Image: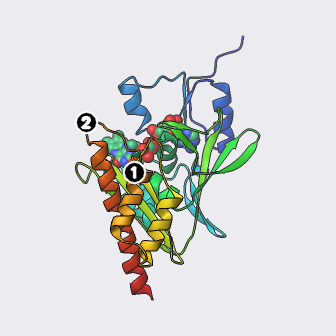
């Protein structure tokens, strides 16, 4: 008689994790569990089993590979507060509390795919790519476009996010978040910037159903950096590009305004940094 696979799997390698997933259709991957556990508690998620990544050491750690910083999907957020990318570091430092940051992983933040999650704008501004691993191999996809709707991604069934590749741009990067309070509150809105060789790339959180960036906004941000546009121009470009939610925490109008303010603040910081560096 065949025994059903135990409901809970504790693999030790990525291959074992993929095999455990294949054996348990409908099982939920658990990394830090800081999203999964509250969801189960509030009954907003169902699970036919669990595959924990806690013992998969190969998914943890940050290394340099050529032009990229390669961040294992199971790397705790706490380990990223000193990341070489200052935008990612600032986003990590303002996520939850020290306890949450110790358990929470970057992979869980990415796959949760909610537009207000801290790390997403920093990854989008930085041009991150994701390594998605399945039984048939690894595919690398841009983070831009990976989140298709709130909570939904291009991750296929049986696939694991194994690493995040963030280009080492060598320029200026930063992240800012507006929330009801500084600690333990998700972003009402957020924004990240990477500025390199006089070109600005901005990305926004809770500015629409998915993490958002826009070529038009970047063009005006770059012009502002160069003194060819005004802060009002950038605020107008942001207002035209975003489609923020309206909810009991804030109105869409407030969010649209705040996103413009954050964009100007970040480009101003990049300007000051450039001025200091030259
Ligand atoms: C008190 C509290 C405060 C919080 N504050 C913030 C905050 O300020 N900002 C913020 O952004 N978030 C916050 N969060 C949410 C949460 O901590 C983060 O989103 C965290 O990064 C999730 O990581 P995790 O490893 O715990 O994910 P998990 O709960 O383990 O998983 C989240 C989702 O990702 C999937 N998943 C995880 N890893 C992988 C993988 N490698 N491959 C495929 N799928 C995977 C899981 O199946 C699940 O769907 C908070 C949570 C709590 C409980």
Q: Circle 1 — which element?
A: helix
Q: Residues within 10 Å of mark 1 (few under 14, many from 20)?
A: some
| Res 241 seen here | yes
Horizontal placement of 92 versus 138: left or right? left
Q: Report the residue marked by disc 2.
A: 248
Q: Residue furthest top?
A: 1
Q: How is the image coloured?
A: rainbow
Look at the picture and state if 32 lies above or below 50.
Answer: below
User: Which of these two is toward me, 224 or 67?
Assistant: 224
Q: Quadrant of residue 40?
A: top left
Residue 141 horizontal/vertical position (percent): 65, 50
Q: Residue at x 50, y 60 (%)?
A: 216
| C-alpha span from label 2 to label 1 | 30 Å
Q: Residues within 10 Å of mark 2 (few under 14, many from 20)?
A: few
Q: Quadrant of residue 267?
A: bottom left
Mark 2 or mark 1, which is nearer to you? 2
Q: Quadrant of residue 229?
A: bottom left
Q: Report the residue marked by disc 1.
A: 102
Q: Where the N terminus falls, by quadrant?
A: top right
Q: Residue at x 48, y 41 (%)?
A: 113
Residue 131 horizontal/vertical position (percent): 65, 50
Q: Residue furthest left?
A: 181
Residue 28 horizontal/vertical position (percent): 54, 30
Q: Where the C terminus falls, by quadrant?
A: bottom left
Horizontal placement of 149 versus 256: left or right? right
């Amino acid at each position: 008689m065949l025994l059903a696979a135990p409901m809970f799997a504790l693999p030790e390698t990525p291959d074992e994790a993929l095999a455990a997933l294949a054996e348990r259709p409908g099982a939920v991957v658990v990394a830090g569990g800081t999203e999964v556990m509250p969801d189960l508690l509030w009954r907003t998620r169902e699970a036919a089993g669990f595959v924990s990544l806690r013992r998969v050491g190969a998914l943890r750690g940050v290394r340099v590979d050529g032009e990229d910083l390669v961040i294992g999907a199971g790397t705790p957020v706490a380990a990223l507060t000193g990341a070489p990318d200052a935008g990612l570091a600032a986003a990590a430092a303002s996520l939850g509390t020290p306890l949450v940051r110790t358990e929470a992983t970057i992979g869980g933040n990415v796959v949760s795919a909610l537009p207000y999650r801290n790390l997403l704008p920093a990854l989008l501004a930085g041009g991150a790519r994701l390594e998605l691993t399945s039984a048939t191999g690894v595919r690398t996809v841009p983070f831009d476009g990976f989140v298709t709707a709130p909570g939904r991604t291009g991750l296929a069934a049986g696939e694991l996010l194994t690493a995040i590749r963030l280009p080492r741009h060598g320029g200026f990067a930063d992240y800012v978040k507006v929330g009801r309070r500084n600690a333990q509150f998700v972003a009402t809105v957020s924004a990240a910037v990477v500025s390199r060789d006089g070109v600005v790339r901005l990305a926004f959180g809770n500015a629409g159903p998915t993490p958002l960036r826009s070529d038009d906004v970047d063009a005006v941000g770059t012009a502002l950096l160069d003194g060819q546009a005004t802060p009002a121009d950038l605020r107008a470009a942001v207002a035209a590009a975003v489609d923020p939610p309206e909810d009991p925490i804030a109105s869409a109008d407030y969010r649209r305004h705040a996103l413009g303010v954050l964009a100007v603040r970040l480009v101003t910081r990049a300007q000051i940094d450039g001025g200091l560096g030259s």
